[in-house]
Image (cartoon, rainbow, N blue to C red):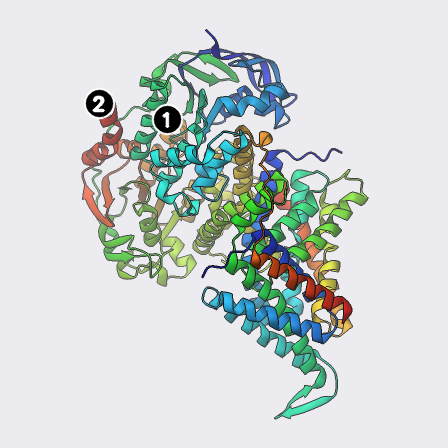
Amino acid sequence: MKIKANPSILFLYGLTLTILAFTLRKLNPLAFSSLLNLSIGLVLGFRKYRFLIAAFLLSLVGVAVNALIFAGGEPVYHIGCLVIRSGAITGFIEVSLRLALMFSATLIFSSLTNPRDLLRSLESELGLPKQVSFTVSLSLRLLKIFETDIREIQAVRKSRGLRTTPITPSDWDSFLSPLLSLGLERGRWIGIATELRGFSLRKVKKTCLKLGFVDFLLLTLMLIQVLASLLF
Amino acid sequence: MKFNYTTVDLAILAVVAALFGAVFAFAWTPYYAIKAIGGKPAAVLLTYGIWYMAAPLTATLLKKPGSAVLGETLAGLVESLIPQIGGSSSLIYAFFQGLFSEAVYALGKYRSFGSLQAVLAGAVPAIPSILLDIFIWKSIYPLEVFTILTVLAMASGAIYGFIAYKIAERTR
Amino acid sequence: MQKALQVDVEEAGYEFGKLILRNVHLTLEKGELLLLLGPTGSGKSTFILMITGVLNNLLYGYVKGTVRLFDINPLEPEGFRQVPRYIGVVLQSHELQIAMQTPLDEILFTLENLGVENAFEKAKRVLDKYGLLDKAEVDVETLSGGEKKRLCLASSIVHEPELFILDEPTANLDPWGEREILNYVLELRRRGKTVIITEHKPRYFLKIADKIAVIENHTLRLGLKNSKDFIYSATVSLKKRREKERREIVRLEKVKFRYCSECSLVLRDTSLQVFNGENVAIIGPNGSGKTTLGKIISGLLKPIDGEVRIAGAVPWQLKPRELLKKVIYIPQEPNYFFVRNTVEEELKLAAEYGSLKLEDVVKNLESWILDKMNESPYRLSYGQKKWLTYIIARIYGSKVVVFDEPTAGLDFQLVKKFFTWLKEEGRTGVTSILLTHDVRVLENAADRVFIIENGEVKEVSVREGIEILRKPVEEWFYEN
């Protein structure tokens, strides 16, 4: 069964979750939001985003290591010569919950919609200015071309005996210059071509925001979580 | 100065946003590589500034009010639309980083878009960037660590702000 | 009868004080085809930007004079806003034009901008006509080069404009693609549309143009003084150069390659042998695998099966310095090639690798390069950039140089110069491998020719190679 949700609502929901990841102070509402959305996210995105989930789990390992090294508090466990402080445990849990909340935003959004539908929805339903939707749309289009550019540049750098992955600022300088040079030429002409295709005349017909059951569910969840963050 | 963005300006904004969208996704590799060898301070010094570069680059290219915040925010938006573990956090970081960069140009009444402005516009975003980090990580890192990171990030931002200026001038 | 275009301009440019065009007077009747010639950088594109109102309305340039496009004045803001209804534009490369992520979005974009009724149906119809209907909602980057070009063509006609502007439409196309453009132009003529084509490869368009104009010395002149100015006539040299000793320098045996495990094979069972000092052309349509083959020979890609030997060594097993001594790959896009901030630093880097002193290198350089030593390579013109890549390659002193579409985007003066260059390189024993679909390379430089077909490489005679590349368009002229 395919779940239909309004892309704009999904985007707002994901944005709210991300903001909550920063602003939630108390552990209980944080745990509630984080675990609830992580579950939803995992159910929706388990098949498609396996690698991303693995990357996320790997990042939690990094959090654990940092917690062991930096966090304070009374020592609670000793494993060999490793001292685990209480701060490390609470710190690990708290940071992991925050990261999980952010990650769940990605899973939920990316599993149910895509940037293209989002832009269409924002432009026609929420009245997003055409300048913004055009710019974002174009950058998504150019993204793939830049990825090809990066591969080609890496091949040449390798053949001319240079690092293919930039490390120093000077590496970045020589890496970004050709990308920018090519990009600007494309940008200039695409801008001209777009103007000649009547962009200034563009007026997208506004349609009413159509909300379904899932959208109301999301809006309700959003409200509950925001209220929880303020009250508890 | 008029806030007048032509389609060519919009296309250039899109170019910078896409460029950094592609670069950001790819910059995590050197970050982790350097971190493994030189530790977090080296990694921050050599790579954090890249995430603040879109603002001074766009401003030096377009020389219009709003270009710093728009360039950085759009780059962050593009990065957040690519499925990655941070959710929409890239957008939030980018927006505040962009605002601080924009402030540098605004304080000069948009009269100059030179190398000094670019260096400052690259350095100041470190402040909101690390502040936002504090919201997430404060239960693990003590305040001293954040202070050191801010200094390192500002230095990194200044270096890459200067590079942004150079490559913009070189390719205009 | 209303004229399509009336231009009476004294001066025009991007900045006051730096004029690009002067004394431009031109009248174009409805239904006429104007072919606009001139070397790169002469102002052909500026002319286009001027008559469409882009120069002064969008790019902050200036125009002193009048332009009338049908019944509007494109130089005025109100007229400029209406220009899109009258014109359809095809630029040299899809990368300079396609703004949306899918073909359907791309076609709909123009229709939505102009508020055209039944946009969706019209879009689907034109996509169908250009064979893109089943790919309407896929990512544009997954389309082949030919499909992307067809998308640009489709997008230019969907709103049924009266004037078509084609800016170097055959720039990145192989002979098969050129044929599609000719068909497209013929269709436009049949419908009575007015067409302006700018080109510096005008060989075929000369036959169908009603008016020819040349932009030279900042001004526009009607008619051609001497058609030889713009057609690089073929001087077929079929004599094989006699080598004192014939040493094998490149060998590929039964090479197989694919980009990923789910991808189809790009090269299957590819074998070839090249001897030192030869200029070998490898031809085939765009997308046939020429670049892939070139990169394998250069050690940049490793085949999944088969043997590759460059001067006796396996290229991907060598360290960069050793590999550079044997082979270098020059990409079609010169911007990919530069790794330093100034021309001088580029030459210095190459000199270090080639174990040469920069002073010795500089002695043999042309004056225009010496003038640009402190400039960024990215600020050079396209032709200068490409030439710089050849100079850098020469300084590296590799035994084998792989050129990817070396003549693409160069005007005829530089193309002539390039063939002379190749002859000199050959004399010093350098082997040149030329990945190309340009028949002039075979007519003027190639000693041997290989063709890539279905992932396999077959040697053909130079004459046969020329036939293969000339056939698509010559057949078209025969049919039409």
Toward which corner of the image does residue C18 lie, by quadrant? Answer: top right
The amino acid type found where label 1 is placed reads Lys
Mark seen at residue C201: 1
Does residue C60 appear in the picture of this structure? yes
Front-most of residues C330 and C147 = C147
Q: Neighbour class for label 1 at 10 Å: few (<14), some, many (≥20)?
A: many
- What residue appears at the point 45 percent right and 53 percent down from the top-left corner? A151
Q: Where residue C191 sits: x, y (%)?
A: 36, 19
Q: Neighbour class for label 2 at 10 Å: few (<14), some, many (≥20)?
A: few
Judged from the image, the secondary structure of the residue bearing numbered disc 2 is helix
- What residue appears at the point 56 percent right and 53 percent down from the top-left corner? A6
**In which quadrant will I find the N terminus of chain C?**
top left
Please tell me which of labels 2 and 1 falls first in the chain: 1
Q: Which residue is mark 2?
A: C478
Toward which corner of the image does residue A79 lie, by quadrant? Answer: bottom right
Q: Where is C302 relative to B75, above or below?
A: below
Judged from the image, the secondary structure of the residue bearing numbered disc 1 is loop
Left or right for C143, reference C20:
left
Parent chain of label 1: C
Parent chain of label 2: C
- What residue appears at the point 56 percent right and 22 percent down from the top-left corner? C82
- Residues tagged by mark 2 and mark 1 found on one chain of the structure: yes
